[in-house]
Image (cartoon, rainbow, N blue to C red):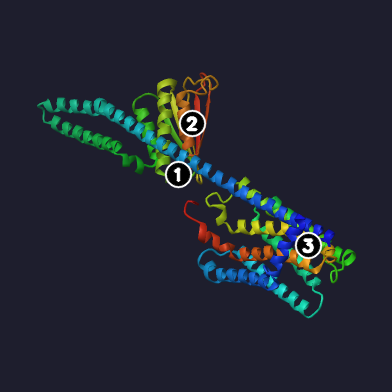
């Protein structure tokens, strides 16, 4: 009964196009615009940051592959390989690179490097012997990727408190805090969805759309936050961090 | 359809549940971080207040010490010289006028030197190394014991005035303790500069004391709290009848 109620609300939300593909794309481009404006105008005068450029590159990359995937879908062709290669692998490597750059602990950095290597080897093995990269969702790889990103984000946020980092500023004025928080929220809610993608294909397409819509809503929010996070020091920082 | 909706409901619910757990974690971390910030600020304010109190005490003690020194000098040195000058000038011989002039010149020099020691800015402008020389000269001039100043490394002045004041007071306290309680035949000060690190060792061959039986004497607590105020370290090595060595190190 409860399940039916939730479904009803979700179907309504979906029907109302709460987060259709076009709104999702719009969120990505909004994040991208925020990042570009920061890089061109504010980054020059405020503080040059290579990590911010990495985040900008990541959003740009996501915008490109999402557009390509939509183009393929509209042409009636399979776009799984695009998500497999770009989302499950390349985006994961970019995010691992970002987490490597922001985690200052040598031990964590080494772990990220080792994990990236293992993930690369696993990705090749999975593609060659277990799941066809052109036709099957690489959800085993995604399970690995999302769990690792969740772990490294948790380690980063926990490390801030444990090691008294950013002691002069409030946490909400730290871009990396916003970024890792959104990654935590997206990957914690999203990895169940992506993990069960094969199983979900057996469901009613409308129900899959509901889940997809919810997932796109969180993802879209994440890309907006990633694009605008670097404005937070300008908005929230004060001399005494109050 | 019913089983599908339940499965979908479970997936949705699990996702939302995980999302809430992560959000809770983030909120908890923000609160903990904020609480630590507040505690740390409070601690820093307490330390600042403590530091300012130490500086005030040090300035007061230096002033008292200086006044005591000036009073002693006026009585024992300038007073004596003036009395001597009066006696010399009372002599009707012409050579005594010349002698009187010499004595008056000496008195002028002594008064100038005294006026310098009263001026607080003088201590601020004085190089730490010169201060040590002056203090040891004073001890030696009083005929109390022999003194020696040695140094290693490029001599640099201490840029932080408050640090210098506290160090000056620490040295004065150590010398006073040696004079009052140790009855030494010599006192040596060794000054060592190694980059920003300043090392100071004050050694005497006095009666010494058992550091285990006097670990919490008021004088030692004072020395410790003052060196703590400038983020320095102090080590006291002493044994009965074997003298005392006080080592201080501080970043300047």
Q: Against B104, is A218 above or below?
A: below
Residue for badge 3? A194
The answer to whether the residue labelled 3 contacts the one labelled 1, judged by CB atoms less than 8 Å apart, is: no
Left or right side of B43 for A129:
right
At 64% from the left edge and 49% from the top edge, which residue is drawn?
A159
Residue B155 got which mark?
A: 1
- Within 10 Å of the Cα at label 2, are there few (<14), some (14-19), or many (20+) other Cα atoms? some
Q: For numbered disc 2, what is the local secondary structure?
A: helix
Q: Nearer the viewer, residue B163 or A156?
A: A156
At 47% from the left edge and 45% from the top edge, which residue is drawn?
B154
Mark pair 2, 3: CA separation: 63 Å
Q: Chain of mark 3?
A: A
- Within 10 Å of the Cα at label 3, are there few (<14), some (14-19), or many (20+) other Cα atoms? many
Are marks 3 and 1 in one subunit? no
Q: Residue furthest left?
A: B92
> Would residue A203 be visible to someone looking at this image?
yes
Could you tell which of marks 1 and 2 lies nearer the N-terminus? 1
Q: Nearer the viewer, residue B97 or A209?
A: A209
Q: Quadrant of residue A48 in the image?
A: bottom right
Q: For numbered disc 1, what is the local secondary structure?
A: loop
Are marks 1 and 2 in one subunit? yes
Q: Against B148, is A2 above or below?
A: below
Residue for badge 2? B224
Depth check, mark 2 against mark 3: the one in front is 3
């Amino acid at each position: 009964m409860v399940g039916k109620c939730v479904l009803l609300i979700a179907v309504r939300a979906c029907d109302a196009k709460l987060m259709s593909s076009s709104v999702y794309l719009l969120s990505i481009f909004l994040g991208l615009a925020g990042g570009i404006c920061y890089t061109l105008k504010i980054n020059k005068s405020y503080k040059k940051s290579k990590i911010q450029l990495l985040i900008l590159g990541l959003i740009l990359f996501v915008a490109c592959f999402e557009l390509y995937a939509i183009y393929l879908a509209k042409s009636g062709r399979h776009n799984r390989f695009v998500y497999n290669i770009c989302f499950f692998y390349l985006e994961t490597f970019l995010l691992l690179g970002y987490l490597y750059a922001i985690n200052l602990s040598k031990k964590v950095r080494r772990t990220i490097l080792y994990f990236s290597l293992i993930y690369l080897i696993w990705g090749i093995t999975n593609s060659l012997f277990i799941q066809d990269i052109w036709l099957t969702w690489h959800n085993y790889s995604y399970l690995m990727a999302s769990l690792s990103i969740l772990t490294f984000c948790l380690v980063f946020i926990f490390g801030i408190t444990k090691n008294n980092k950013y002691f002069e500023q409030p946490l909400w004025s730290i871009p990396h805090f916003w970024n890792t928080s959104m990654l935590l929220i997206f990957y914690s809610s999203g990895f169940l969805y992506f993990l069960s993608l094969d199983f979900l294909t057996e469901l009613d397409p409308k129900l899959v759309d509901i889940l997809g819509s919810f997932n796109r809503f969180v993802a879209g929010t994440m890309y907006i936050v990633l694009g605008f996070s670097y404005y937070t020091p300008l908005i929230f920082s004060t001399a005494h961090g109050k | 359809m019913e089983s599908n909706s339940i499965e979908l409901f479970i997936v949705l619910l699990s996702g939302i549940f995980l999302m809430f757990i992560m959000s809770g974690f983030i909120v908890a971390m923000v609160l903990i971080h904020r609480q630590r910030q507040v505690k740390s600020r409070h601690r820093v304010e307490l330390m600042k207040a403590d530091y300012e109190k130490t500086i005030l005490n040090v300035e007061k003690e230096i002033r008292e010490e200086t006044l005591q020194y000036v009073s002693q000098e006026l009585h024992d040195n300038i007073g004596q010289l003036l009395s001597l000058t009066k006696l010399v000038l009372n002599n009707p011989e012409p050579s005594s006028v010349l002698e009187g002039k010499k004595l008056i010149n000496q008195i002028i020099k002594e008064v100038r030197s005294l006026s310098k020691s009263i001026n607080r800015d003088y201590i601020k402008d004085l190089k730490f190394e010169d201060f040590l020389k002056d203090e040891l000269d004073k001890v030696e001039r009083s005929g109390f014991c022999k003194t020696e100043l040695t140094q290693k490394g490029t001599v640099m002045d201490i840029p932080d005035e408050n640090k210098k004041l506290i160090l000056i007071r620490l040295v004065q306290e150590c010398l006073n303790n040696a004079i009052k309680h140790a009855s030494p035949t010599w006192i040596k000060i060794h000054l060592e500069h190694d980059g920003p690190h300043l090392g100071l060792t004050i050694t005497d061959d006095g009666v010494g004391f058992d550091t285990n039986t006097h670990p919490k004497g008021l004088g030692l607590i004072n020395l410790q709290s003052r060196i703590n105020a400038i983020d320095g370290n102090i080590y006291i090595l002493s044994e009965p009848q074997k003298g005392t060595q006080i080592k201080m190190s501080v970043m300047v």
